[in-house]
Image: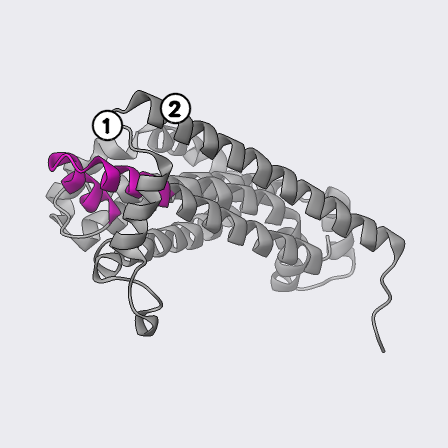
Amino acid sequence: MSEVITPSRTRRWRDGLTASASQLGVLAACVLLWQLATLGARSPFFPTPVRIVTEMWQLWFSGDVGTLFLTEAAFEDVLPSVGRLLLGWLLAALVGIVLGMLLGRSGNALAYVGPLLSFARSIPPPALLPVFMVLFSIGFTLQLVTITFGCLWPVLLNSADGARSVDPVKAETARAFGISRAHWFVSVVLPAALPKIFAGLRISLSLALIMMVISELVGASNGLGHAMMLARDQFDYERLWGGIVLLGILGYLLNTALSAVERGVLRAVPR
């Protein structure tokens, strides 16, 4: 049976296309202004967007079809950074959600460890890099710990807050029907906490990108942060700006993907 396209759905599609076109128009206008401003300035420190995109294409995306158009530099700079970013973020998400849910549902645990959590999250993760270097030495473990530590707190605190926000009526109803604790947790607590969990995940994903770059500025042998530092030392400002633009594109794509997952999960899970 063919799907019936209702007027309301057609209207939503039209509104979505209009919003997308408006966003692309604003982006194109900003890039055009950027191009005109850098052409007028003629500064070696601020190359034009055309030169930046050309450098990005030649450096990272002019490879063969067999490598999905990725160059050797992309395998050296981009993919290791993305791998460390995602692994550190996933570890922080796993630990943060589990601990946050346990603390949120505990009557007294959060009251006892709350000051400790506030103290730990107030420490800027870059300030702990010297400590991490002593504990883990320079290398992959240092980078992973730095990213994970920086991303942990938004997920943990939002998960704890979400676990505490369960509707008391739902909790009492579940107890009255005598459902098991595991089923109550999955069917009542987790759906109620999901919006705040995803809010913490979005914040931590942005932090993961920042912490990934910071972790690669110290003793790294590959990655975007390492490549940008080399470009700065070699006065290769087109490559440096290319790294900055690529970080922005990565952040946008990752956030878009996470938002799509969030919408699908929240629609599928009854609350």
**Residue under the point 53% across and 44% down:** 159
Q: Could you say where residue 211 lies in the image, as x and y percent from the top left? A: 31, 41
- Amino acid at the residue labelled 2: Ala
Does the rendering let one see residue 211?
Answer: no
> Residue 161: image x %, image y %?
56, 38
**Depth order, front residue of 88/64:** 64
In the orientation shown, which residue stands out farthest toward the bottom? 1
Magenta region includes residue 235: yes
Above or below for 261 versus 54: below
Is residue 2 at all visible to an observer of this figure? yes
Residue sitting at x 47%, y 50%: 253
Amino acid type, callout 1:
Phe
Q: Is residue 99 above or below residue 154?
A: below
Find the magenta span and give its range: 224-247
Q: Which mark is residue 223?
A: none
Indicate left or right for 81 with 117 as reference: left
Which quadrant of the structure image shows residue 42? top left
Which residue is depicted at the point 29% across and 33% down? 47
Left or right position of 248 against 6: left
Instruction: Name the chief secondary structure element in magenta.
Output: helix
Magenta residue check for 196: no
In the picture, measured across the screen, residue 205 lies left or right of residue 22, that is left
Q: Position of residue 39 (x, y in %)?
A: 34, 27
Element carrying mark 2: helix
* Crowd around label 1: few <14 · some 14–19 · many ≥20 (10 Å): some
Point out residue 66 in the picture as x, y percentages from the top left corner: 32, 74
Q: Which residue is mark 1?
A: 45
Which image quadrant: the N terminus? bottom right
Q: Residue furthest top?
A: 41
The residue indicated by pointer 2 is: 37
Front-most of residues 2 and 87: 2
Q: Is residue 180 left or right of residue 234?
A: right
